[in-house]
Image (spheres, coloured by chain):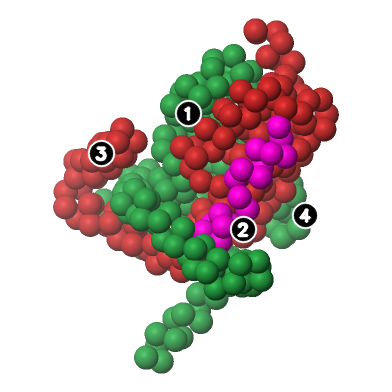
Chain colours: A green, B red
Amino acid sequence: MLTGIKSLLKKIDGTLIFLGALVLVAVIAAQAIGGGDKVLDGLERAGSLFESVWLRLILGFILGGMIRLLIPSALIARWLGHTSGIRGLLIGSYIAIIMPGGPYITMPVIAAIYSAGAGIGPIIALLTGRALLGLQMLIVWQIPFLGVEISMARYIACLVLPPIAGMVGAAIYKLVFGPPPVVGEIGGQTTDADPPSDTTDDASSDSENEV
Amino acid sequence: MDLSLAILIGMVAVAIGLAFWRGGWRQILAGLKEAVLTFKTVWFRLILGFTLGGLIQVLIPGDLIAEWLGPTSGIKGILIASYAGVVMTGGPYVSLPIVASIYAAGAGPGPVIALLTSMNLLSLPGLLTWAIPFLGAKIALTRYIVCLFLPPLIGFVGAGVFELIS
């Protein structure tokens, strides 16, 4: 019991506090607008959202885990790491074009790439590229609903933006949060307790030794 | 089973096959262990994210957004569209029909392109339900802030490109 509470307390970080505070605000707002019914309605929609993605999410986690294992950290650090420069920004920006699927699959995969030692700039480029240049989004959704002309006009207008967003993002991150956590580049040690990096690194170096 | 699920299952099967080829069952188990570790980090954040996503849906009705946009044009239309996407919820199967109806109602290519961009780039549910739980608040918020000014820009440029190719 005590260890359970302890491990729960250990989970509390900036991200969790931020999300928790927003949930509280949203619950209060829903309560103020429509009472308990509105809150329940919101929770029901959360439930149906979860219901529609849980299977895909599990598959996404598995894919992320396999990719984390199949692509060595050293390779990710070399191609997308903090010192990968413009090349890292370009690779991050444009591999997003062929990344299929909704967030339930791309997010576990991007988290795996991040924890394997990718830099802030390439990750931001990848996130931006995914949102702007995903081929699946263009072909499956936008062209059928809106036609080729307007969908292609948007796509072309967005082509050069992800690397720029990555570059500016890395600079802003450094300015606001200080030097980024170094992951995967110094023997799998991490200097920051943020995201998946803190839990996955030790295990990954173990598993790599097993190969 | 729909196509996207089939593609996803295919990708997972290929990854598991590759892992088996590289190191047998041991390698597959190690991959699953990685998956569980990621899950352990994000599960609680995900619950909060989904809760937020649901509450935002009931707090902001989608039809209101369609009403705001209407057949507006010019700079005002592009600016409204650029930030309407912030509160648009649901997957593409919800949002694309809304955009299509706004387009059909007479909105210009600039606002439609700005809206499409902000839906994907600045969606608040996308940020809160997915990016923050998986990557942490710092990097997710940095990306969001950098992208804040992009939809109007893309709206203008996109409208120009639309003129050229149509």
Q: Are marks 4 and 1 in contact (CB under 8 Å)?
A: no
Q: Chain of mark 1?
A: A
Residue at 65% x, 8% y: name it.
B165
Considering depth in this image, is A138 or A110 the residue closer to the camera? A138
Q: Give the percent coordinates (x, y) of residue A142.
A: 52, 26
Q: Give the percent coordinates (x, y) of residue A47.
A: 41, 61
A63 shown above or below B7: below
Find disc 2 in the rendering and name its residue: B59
Instruction: Confirm whether the magenta stretch covers residue B63.
Output: yes
- Kindly state the secondary structure of the residue where label 2 is placed: helix
Find disc 4 in the rendering and name its residue: A175
Q: Amino acid at mark 1?
A: Trp
Give the Cα separation between the discs numbered 2 and 1: 26 Å
Q: Amino acid at mark 4?
A: Leu
Residue at 82% x, 32% y: name it.
B76
Give the magenta range: B52-70
Give the Cα separation between the discs numbered 2 and 4: 35 Å
Instruction: Confirm whether the magenta stretch covers residue B93.
Output: no
- Kindly state the secondary structure of the residue where label 3 is placed: loop
The furthest residue to the right:
B75
State which quadrant residue A199 falls in: bottom left
- Kindly state the secondary structure of the residue where label 4 is placed: helix
Give the Cα separation between the discs numbered 2 and 3: 32 Å
Find disc 3 in the rendering and name its residue: B1
Q: Chain of mark 4?
A: A
- Closest to the camera, between mark 4 and mark 3, is 3
A20 shown above or below B20: below
